[in-house]
Amino acid sequence: MHVTAGNIITHLYYAVAADGRLLILSNFNEDFMSVAGLCANIGLGTESVAIIENGKYIETFPPAAEVDNYQVKIQNGRECLYQGVSLSRLISREYLFIEKKNWEEQLYAYLMNQFEFPILRRWIPYVTEEAMAKKLLHISEMKVIGETGLFDGYEIWHSEMTNEALLSILQAGLSDKKIHISEQEQRPLDFSDMDDYFNKYGHTLVDNLERLLKPLTSMKDKVEELTFIGKSLYPQQAAVVNGAVECLKKKKYAFLIESMGAGKTLQGLGVAEAFFNQEYLRKHSEKTVKEVYTDGMLIKFRVIIMCPAHLGMLVNE
């Protein structure tokens, strides 16, 4: 099979369409310029795309708007081919490639990524039923030409969902009690100010955090491998330093996001020092923290502070 757009023709690998719209097209050829040229013609959005088999046109698609193109070189011994792929930007926005056996999870991911409302996973059957009844969702007829086995087990869903439409579905479901946030009856919170709120409900926040989050380290109010001259960390600051140090053991960066005056500079310096101290002591188990601070040549590292020039207080710190 071949594919043509404009005055360029190449070999067809596969084409996927729904509702008469070309969503994906993959072509290949020994000549890179042919592959790149076909992709460019498709990307212009002005050229029709035709599929040719045995010299006959078997399918024609209207010009595709909003397309991203990719080309790659495929080397097989001395043979070299170039493959191009044209992807419609409507994919994941209006047209969803849904695996049949995992449709609920994938539709849930789509709704959570595309819209601003938090949705519970168990609401998906209700939301889907309502959206289909309102013709906001439907399963399109998928047409695959060429290598068809790549898309076995998949469907294409067409979505016309909007924030307003999804909000209406959720509000109706909650009002009619077809969906619920909690199986227990919910009562309005009763508090006069934030102090009253934390006194009444603070324990539930802590319980939920402990249930949902998995801290990298326990909440320690002291950093064992760190000493400052003339300064000390408050327990809350020490807990932050311990957490950030554990984070740096798994990643190359950590963010300390706190309000002004919370001690971010001191904590940041503490994170750097505690991290390098711990790394050294881990590799040299015979050494102690006292020896680390007694011999200033044992550990060498550099701290760079970047800040706006008008923050002169950091120079003193």
Image: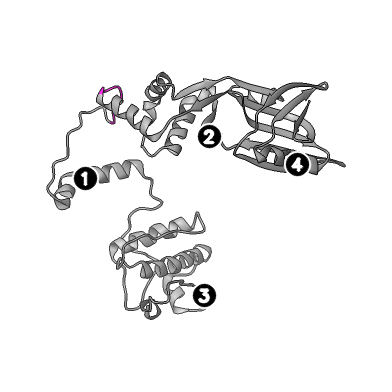
Q: Which residues are magenta?
A: 176-181
Q: Which residue is mark 4?
A: 37
First-in-chain label (2 vs 4): 4
Front position among marks 2 and 4: 4
Q: Secondary structure at mark 1?
A: helix
Q: Which residue is mark 1?
A: 203
**Residue 177 placement, left or right of 278:** left
Q: Residue at x 34, y 27 (%)?
A: 169
Gap in angstroms between the C-alphas marked 4 and 1: 64 Å
| Residue 52 badge | none
Work out which quarter of the rendered image holds the C terminus and state it. Answer: bottom left
Type of amino acid at the residue the image marks with label 1 = His
Type of amino acid at the residue the image marks with label 4 = Gly
Residue 181 image offset from top left, x and y in percent: 29, 31
- 232, 187: nearer the viewer: 187
Q: Which residue is mark 3?
A: 298
Q: Residue furthest right?
A: 78
First-in-chain label (1 vs 3): 1
Q: Which residue is mark 2?
A: 92
**Residue 137 placement, left or right of 77:** left
Question: How many numbered marks, from 0 up?
Answer: 4
In this rendering, is residue 271 above or below 169? below
Q: Residue at x 33, y 55 (%)?
A: 219
- 240, 317: nearer the viewer: 317
